[in-house]
Image (spheres, helix red, strand yellow):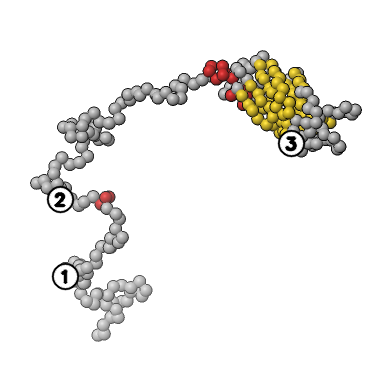
Amino acid sequence: MSNFGIQGQLLEVTVVGCNKLKDTEWISRQDPYVCLEYGSTKFRTRTCTDGHKTPVFQEKFVFSLIEGLREINVAVWNSNTLTVDDFIGSGKVQLVKVLSQGFDDSTWPLQTKTGRYAGEVRLIMHYSNAAKLASSCAPSAPPYGIPPVPQAPVYPTSSPYPNNSAFPTSSPYPTNSAYPTSSPYPSNSAYPTSSPYSSYPPNSAGYPPSLYSAPPPSTYPPPPYPPTSAYPPPPYPPPPQASSYYPPGPYSGAYPPPRY
């Protein structure tokens, strides 16, 4: 919760007492007292004579809050008559809880100058304006214990028709098509379910590819032997022709020339 608007408001702090304080005396029992500092305001409790490690004070102080300052410095000292007072421990008291909830009864740890544990101090803090802040920043929800007023939904959650109604419970419009998805004819209809164009091969795009490739064009039956040629067939052996490797002889015709 936001703690705005605390400037000048009053905060009551009661110093209850201390517990487990560090002992700074060698012979006698120590006489502790507590100092509080908030901004420029400082308070000191009375000295608890022979309080030793568990002094009790029960003293209340009133601080004027400062905007943006959310902690109080606390320190515990041992009072000496002839010498300077002994420092026992110090700590910081956070005000977040008391400013938001209006009340805080907590125990705060104390440390020595070297950071060691030096005991604890108990404070009771009260902030009366926390209720006003809570009421000014309260949400608009109804208070706890009052059941909310039931409201009718904008759209009916169930079908307005009974289960055995003559009207269909599903939407009268198709989901993603202007035509019905199922066939309007019964399964045993007199009309064939196959394609009326039986003379065309089926579309091969809807079938998975074949594992076997198409065979090459068949070579059977073998071509006729000898191959088809002009009729009549040429004489055998074929007539000799002039060779480019031998010069032509004095006789024309077959080579070598016939004997006489």
Callout 3: SS: loop
Residue 198, numbered label: 2
Residue at image x 30%, y 80%? 256
| Three-letter amino acid code of the residue under disc 1 | Pro
> Does label 3 or label 1 sit earlier along the sequence?
3
The residue under the point 79% across, 25% down is 47
Looking at marks 3 and 2 on the same chain, the residue that comes earlier in the sequence is marked by: 3
Q: Which of marks 3 and 1 is in front?
A: 3
Give the crowd class for mark 1: few <14, some 14-19, many >=20 residues within 10 Å: few
Across and down, in percent, residue 227 comes to 22, 69
Residue contact between numbered discs 3 and 1, judged by CB atoms under 8 Å: no
Q: In which quadrant of the rendered image does the C terminus lie? A: bottom left
Q: Name the residue under label 1.
A: 232
Residue 100 on image: x %, y %: 59, 23
Q: In this view, does 61 lie above or below 116?
A: above
Q: Which of marks 2 and 1 is in front?
A: 2
The furthest residue to the left: 190
Please identify the quarter of the rendering in which residue 123 is found.
top right
Mark 3 sits on what residue?
20
Q: Disc 2 and disc 1: Cα gap in Å?
A: 50 Å
- Camera-side residue: 49 or 38? 49
Q: Spatial distance from mark 3 to mark 1, Cα to Cα?
A: 138 Å
Kindly report which numbered mark, 3 or 2, lies closer to the viewer in this rendering: 3
As drawn, is 211 to the left or to the right of 195? right
Question: How far apart in space, not on screen, are marks 3 and 2 (Cα)?
Answer: 103 Å
**In the visual, does 256 lie left or right of 2?**
left
Quadrant into which the N terminus falls: top right
Q: Is residue 93 left or right of residue 77?
A: left
| Residue 149 picture quarter | top left
User: Mark 2, residues whose alpha carbon is within 10 Å: few (<14), some, or many (≥20)?
Assistant: few
**Camera sees residue 218:** yes
